Image (tube, rainbow, N blue to C red):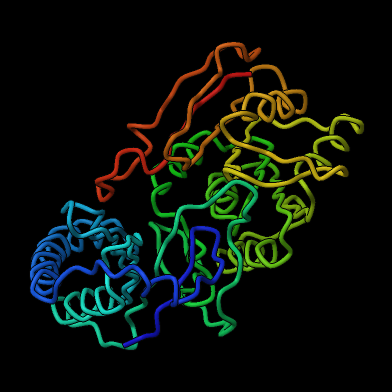
Amino acid sequence: MSSILIANVTGDIISMKNQTETGHFITPEKTAEHADMLSNRVHARFRYLSKRFKRMNIDCFRLYDWDIPEVRAVVDWYAGHIVIAEYERKQTSPEWLPQMARAVSNSLGVPPEKVHMKLRRTRKPGQQRYSRIDSRGERIEVRERDLRFLINLTDFLDTGLHSDHRDTRMMIRELAEGKDFLNLFAYTGAFTCAVAAGGATSTVTVDKSDTYLKWARDNMEINGLKGRQHVFVQSDVGRFLELARAEGRRYTLAFIDPPSFFTYGRKNIDFDINRDHQQLIESVMPVMTPGSVLFFSTNHQRFEPRMDRLPAKDIKEITPSSIPEDYRNRKIHRCWKLIV
């Protein structure tokens, strides 16, 4: 069985000692019961979803989304690989996650070397997301309809592709033809790929991480999406927007998916999604042309939107239609469409 990547949602390594000092573990009998329940649920979901998604040429999807209250985990399918992530709690013994992983492996006939275990903790203010937790550098290719993406199942807590935004990418792609697209906090550029494939005139992909920006270039290249019209910018988003405003750049379609907490700008200002999302959106609007479309999304589970004062012509929450059927958690993210 693969080793456990013990990390919080920012990807920082957590000491195994913290996991074993609680003294209030779930009994072996209960753990076995949880394994049976998870095995049965995952097997049934795979039989149903794999047939549906195969017809759509989709081979990465969620099999289990904390459906059973006692079994605090998610299970994702990635083209023959399994990623199982436990939401850490004091009552769980170190053996709980490996036993769940064995149950899923046996249920689906996936060899142990293709089962990847991860442990998630709640991200705290000031912590960065997407930090590295291994250095194997192994990537595999997965399909999402007519697009292909490179993912890494071992080196980071997140794999490089947020499948919960699969349908959001389709929405934006349908608006892409002839548009000048701006992708902020772009991660590995999946939205840029979708918009470029949809016929955008140009794309600008912005992320602070050089690692993820290179990854975004690779995703574009494996989809045959090349050319000078596709620009990649390694930059703090605040600084990029300052320069774009000064130079009079304008875009007609944009996607913003910021971390819940981060620092930005020359003065290392702290950003909190609940406190600062309105200001962030307002800072993007001056680089958008009148009548352009801007999408904003967050995966903060306790997000409190304050958008009523934004100077937009129309603001509509599109969360229900943006979340795919394989995600039981209908608030895995929240998403808005704004007409500037």
Q: Nearer the viewer, residue 31 or 265?
A: 31
Q: Is residue 31 above or below residue 158?
A: below
Q: Position of residue 96 (x, y in %)?
A: 24, 74
Residue 186: x and y in percent read 63, 50
Q: Camera-side residue: 181 or 151?
A: 151
Can you say whether 136 is above or below 257 in the image?
Answer: below
Whole-percent x, y for residue 216 in the image = 63, 61
Residue 29 lies left or right of residue 24; in this view the side is: left
Res 111 → quadrant: bottom left
Q: Is residue 58 visible in this depiction of the protein?
A: no
| Residue 148 location (% of width, % of height) | 47, 64
Residue visible at 63% across and 33% down in the picture: 253
Residue nearest the viewer, comparing 307 with 147: 307
Let me know if residue 121 appears in the view: yes
Q: How many marks?
A: 0
Q: Is residue 158 above or below residue 307?
A: below
Asked whether, in this view, residue 268 is left or right of residue 84, the answer is right
Residue at figure coordinates x 26%, y 79% from the top left: 95
Q: Quadrant of residue 219?
A: bottom right
Quarter of the image with the N terminus is bottom left
**Residue 40 as seen in the image, left or right of residue 63:** left
Q: Residue furthest right?
A: 246
Q: Quadrant of the C terminus?
A: top right
Q: Residue at x 52, y 33 (%)?
A: 175
User: Which residue is depicted at the point 63% across and 24% down?
Assistant: 278
